[in-house]
Image (cartoon, rainbow, N blue to C red):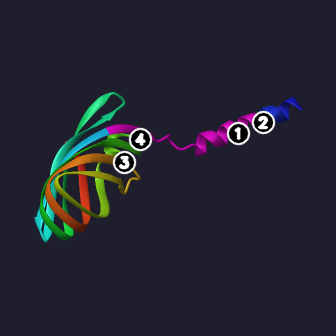
């Protein structure tokens, strides 16, 4: 009976070591994005990822296809989940959206990239802009 217990214990540990995925982690993120356009738009900016107590500078860019009129600046803060390393944040995030800001507005958005990283952001938008568009947001580590 003792030998069977040892066998099953060892088999369970061996299977667990071979199949266990690395645990995903999360971090805090801040982004400042300036968006502007007349029919077609573009956006760019910068930010920082805080992961395991270290700060990683980020750059942001992208295009908007749809109806975009005006100029705005949005300061986002939030978190990024489902990452294992800081480089998992880098990638292309896609979103569709509609919004408007006349001087001051609020934005809340959730995005996912090709590596599975999920951005959950909220922020304050300043400017005069109206949009109904599809956006591609590209984040890279600097």
Q: Residues within 10 Å of mark 1 (few under 14, many from 20)?
A: few
Q: Nearer the viewer, mark 4 or mark 3?
A: 3
- Decide: is 50 above or below 64: above
- Decide: is 104 above or below 24: below
Q: Residues within 10 Å of mark 3 (few under 14, many from 20)?
A: some
Mark earlier in primary sequence (2, 1): 2
Gap in angstroms between the C-alphas marked 4 and 1: 25 Å
Residue 93: percent from the left, percent from the top?
Answer: 31, 57
Range of residues picked out in magenta = 9-28
Residue at the image point whose x is 41% and y is 53% from the top:
116
Gap in angstroms between the C-alphas marked 4 and 3: 17 Å
| 24 drawn magenta | yes
Q: How many marks?
A: 4
Q: Nearer the viewer, residue 134 or 52?
A: 134
Image disc number at residue 12: 1
Residue position for label 2 = 7
Image disc number at residue 69: none
| 53 drawn magenta | no
Residue at the image point whose x is 39% and y is 50% from the top:
118
Residue furthest to the top in view is: 53
Q: Nearer the viewer, mark 2 or mark 3?
A: 3
Quadrant that contains the C terminus: top left
Mark 4 lies on a secondary structure that is loop
Q: Nearer the viewer, mark 3 or mark 1?
A: 3
Gap in angstroms between the C-alphas marked 2 and 1: 8 Å
Residue position for label 4 = 84
Pointers 2 and 3 in contact (C-beta within 8 Å)? no
Give left or right: position of 5 versus 27.
Answer: right
């Amino acid at each position: 009976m003792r030998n069977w217990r040892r066998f099953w214990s060892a088999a369970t540990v061996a299977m667990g070591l071979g199949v266990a995925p690395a645990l995903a982690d999360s971090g805090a993120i801040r982004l400042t994005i300036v968006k502007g356009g007349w029919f077609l738009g573009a956006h760019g900016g910068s930010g920082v990822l805080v992961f395991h107590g270290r700060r990683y500078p980020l750059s942001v860019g992208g295009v908007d296809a749809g109806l975009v009129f005006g100029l705005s600046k949005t300061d986002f803060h939030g978190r990024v989940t489902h990452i294992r390393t800081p480089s998992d944040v880098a990638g292309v995030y896609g979103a569709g959206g509609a919004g408007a800001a006349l001087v001051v507005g609020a934005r809340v958005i959730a995005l996912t990239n090709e590596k599975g990283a999920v951005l959950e952001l909220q922020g304050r938008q300043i400017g005069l802009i109206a949009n109904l568009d599809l956006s591609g947001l590209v984040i890279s580590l600097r």
